[in-house]
Amino acid sequence: MNPSYSRRKFMAVGTSVFGLSLLLSRCRSKSSSDAKESATAIDPCTDFSGVSETDLKTRKKLGYVDQSPRPESKCGNCNLWLPPKAGKACGGCMLFKGPVHTTGYCTYWAPQSN
Amino acid sequence: MKWFGLLLVTGLCLSCSHYKDALSPDDALNSFTLADEQLGVSIFAAEPQVLDPVEMAFDEEGNAFVVEMPDYPTKPENGQWNGTIRMLTDTNGDGRMDSSLVFADNLSEATSILPWQGGLLVTAAPSIWFLKDTTGDHRADIREVLFTGFFADNSEAQITNLRYSIDNWIYASNTGREGEIRFMRNPKAPAVSVKGGDFRFRLDRGQFEIESSNGQFGLAIDNWGNRFFTENSLHIQQAPIPARYLYRHKHLPAVEATVNISDHAPIMVQETPAPYWRAERTKRRNQQFAEANLDRKEYADDHFTGASGGTFYGGDGLPKEYYGSVFTGDVAGNLVHRDVLTTSPTSPAFVASRGSQEKEHEFLASTDPWFRPVNFTVGPDGCLYVIDMYRQHIETPTAIPDDLKEEMDFTNGRTQGRIYRIAPKTHNAATVRPKLRSKSSAELIPLLAHPNQWWRLQAHRLLLEKQDKSTIPALRTMAAKHPDSQARLHAFFVLEGLDALDASLIVQGMQDIQPEIRAYGAMQAERFSACLPQLIDKASDSSARVVFQTSLSLGQFSSPTVVPALARILEKYGRDRWFRTAILSSESGSSVALAKQLVQNGVIFKTETPYADAFLHDLAFVIGSRKRGNETAELLALFDKQPHWKAIASKGVAEGQTRTV
């Protein structure tokens, strides 16, 4: 995967996710199993539905990509990395909202310190 | 800043600003403390002659060209860019610039320049340009895009740092950002991906390629062509293996191409308190770390965070102890740090240390929080010049919480800028005018032995620009006999640029008393198969640097005779990861034949060591990834009676086989 986080793509992803969630909400059955299915239908690593336009712009401005071009520098070893919560595949970043891959990278990468 | 907190607490704060106002250039001088009392700081240029400078370069005539970046940190979306390149002039010869001319304007985020063929090469993402004045009005009328396709979304991490090196290549930093680079003078040339690396090119041969480093803002190239780069928190790094070797085949395990060579903690001795926004942001981040139970901490001050402009000092204006140092600014710390470089007897990686007089304080520190030493250059006078962007705030605004930005004006300082000269207090500040363009080839050749790197590189560049073949005999004599080793190496590469390097010169280079010249001889031997026997001999050279280059260059040959030589190198230097990678980067160095040779020699597999484990694992990984014929079985069969090595080889093979290339 080699995504280019252009605003257009974000909009497309955001719109499609929003559309999908709208479709799911309209088609929701009353059974709890269906509800579970719809909840798991959205991949949290590509779910930008709750992410503001400002945060999307910040991601782009900082040059965020899902796959770091540099093996030694990636979100997973960045000081601003927020590890995934239990059971989640993606973490987050202190600089912007939305899913962040362990393998990701942006120009603000900084080594971890403690 | 503690008093400020007290005022806030007691409700006595009547000021609405957390931030100090600017100082005049003369008052700013009083804010500096230099570690060395022999040295002094003087103003070379200041507003209104220069605004928001980020780089300065002296051309061959001695003209000072400055890149201005007033649009920072925003990017005008209307195409009304304010990036400018100015030529500064000193009309009365007192050493202080009192006039300026606009060489080029309306530039989008220009950050770096390099004098070239009477004009300037310019990085302005997404492109590298050639600008030249052909009418004599000192204003560029030629504006040609040479390369394009570089990342252009963050002005702090874009194509920059144009540097001409002794090997005739021009280097530039790209922060490892993705880009498919096209050469506009040859549209048919395939685009080159620079993802994960930097960039280098030769306009004389139309060559361009990725380079294995990922510098941000600051690229220091020493007298021998070793490159050191700056990147925010990591103030000095190196990439010992050039990309052309590192990517010879696609089967290496993930390789870390760069190394932090600082031997000291990432601590800077800062004379300014952390600005309010940074202190507050750090406090919040540390709170977030604690809430998330992360064993992490951020520091608001006294730790490198905005390292910038690493520059090699090869001048002759400062006292001898500074020669060969790398000067790096930290724009957040308002200071200039100095590193002393030393080589290692067992590794190509250098070691960067604090100067003996700078253990407890920096080379230069300011109490003025507006002081932003973004870059440096060395002039024809041998002095060190500090490029001070002079801004109230210097940070990506998107990285600062909105509430903290409310009282911050990121444009404060757009009408200011300073360039300082650091020199001995006894220095005469009169402007030096080399006027090299009118010099003949015969006059330029002796300058290859000048004690100041600036003169040597200018003369070198101009000799190649002239392409005067009549200089070849004199250059051959210089390469062979000149007492100055740097002159010999310059002559060697001027000959290379004149297409006059032959096997005899290369063999002579491999026998030079200077290790760096022997190493370049080994590198150039790749071009002549007749030089292979002498190259193999270099595997036993007394210098680790020569042996390291030999390990890379031998890999360019497919002859079976290189395998025993590579094995010898591994047995002596294999504890160093760069040597192991250098060997594995080639076909011969990652072959079953090499494994057989090592088993036969019985040296590295005699006892279990971490380095032997690592090498065998990676060798097996490559062979597993290649999936070629019976190689995997052949490799594993070598260790049938040695369970430890068998297990490591099996693991490496298995991991390599699952690799997709």
Image (cartoon, coloured by chain):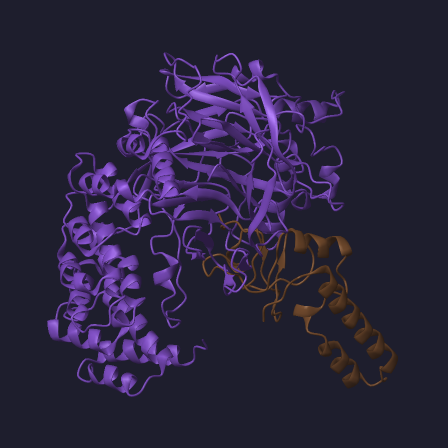
Chain colours: A brown, B purple
Q: Residue B601 at x, y = what percent?
A: 11, 71
Name the residue nearer the viewer: B513 or B353. B513
Quarter residue B339 falls in = top left
Residue B234 appears in the picture as rendered: no
Could you tell whether B279 is left or right of B216 in the image? Answer: right
Residue B185 appears in the picture as rendered: yes
Residue drawn at the location 39% of the way across and 81% of the way down: B657
The relative height of residue A86 versus residue B508 in the rendered view (above or below) is below
Q: Residue B259 at x, y = what percent?
A: 38, 51
Name the residue nearer the viewer: B296 or B418. B418
Q: Residue B596 at x, y = what percent?
A: 18, 77
Quarter residue B313 falls in = top left
Quarter residue B583 falls in = bottom left
The relative height of residue B333 versus residue B239 in the rendered view (above or below) is above
Could you tell whether A43 is left or right of B258 in the image? Answer: right
Residue drawn at the location 50% of the way across and 62% of the way down: B193
Name the residue nearer the viewer: A83 or B91. B91
The relative height of residue B135 versus residue B77 in the rendered view (above or below) is above
The quarter of the picture where the C terminus of chain B appears is: bottom left
Residue drawn at the location 22% of the way across and 40% of the way down: B488
Q: Residue A111 at x, y = what percent?
A: 49, 50
Could you tell whether B572 is left or right of B390 in the image? Answer: left
Residue drawn at the location 69% of the way across and 42% of the way down: B74
The quarter of the picture where the N terminus of chain B appears is: top right
